[in-house]
Amino acid sequence: MVAVDPIKVAPAQRELPGAWHGKADLPMHCNPIEGDLYAEHKVQRLVLNLVVDERQRPWSVEEIGRAIAGKHSTVEIRDALAQLRVIGLIHEAGEVVFASQAAAHIDRLEMLSI
């Protein structure tokens, strides 16, 4: 048997070191985020369904919190409001929230659901 110099072996044939964490799978395989993302989207849908109605009335942030009380935390509700504002589905004026024209149109098309 002839000894092979590791320097002269093609890179694809070299044995590579294992992962730094020492696990067979990547760390995130044990902690998928699908559940968290689903929960986040659920809060956004609840908030959006509250503020979208044919009268386009404004809602106070406190009123939204009371309507969803017990189901989701204040932090989750505020995060949902922030996300919906950033993507343009709601507008905020101080502590008052109302649906954008885009959100109202989506509701008229019956594309919004809980």
Image (cartoon, helix red, strand yellow):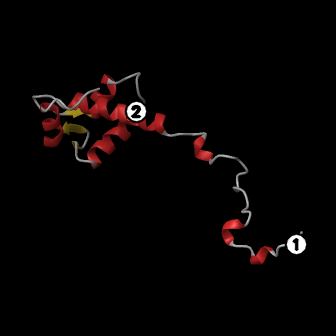
Q: Secondary structure at mark 2?
A: helix
Is residue 62 visible in the rendered image? The answer is no
The residue carrying mark 1 is: 2
Q: Residue at x 21, y 31 (%)?
A: 51
Q: Amino acid at mark 1?
A: Val
**Residues marked 2 and 1 touching at CB (< 8 Å):** no
Identify the residue at horizontal 47%, vertical 37% (top origin).
34
Instruction: Tell me residue 91's x, y (percent).
Output: 21, 43
User: Going by the picture, which residue comes out furthest to the left?
Assistant: 55
Seen as rendered, the residue at the extreme bottom is: 8
Query: In terms of depth relative to the viewer, which is nearer, 87 or 94?
Result: 87
Residue 24 x/y as whole percent: 69, 47
| Residue 48 or residue 34, whichever sits in front | 34
| Image quarter of the N terminus | bottom right
- Dot 2 corresponds to which residue? 74
Residue 5 falls in image quadrant: bottom right
Residue 68: percent from left, percent from top: 34, 24
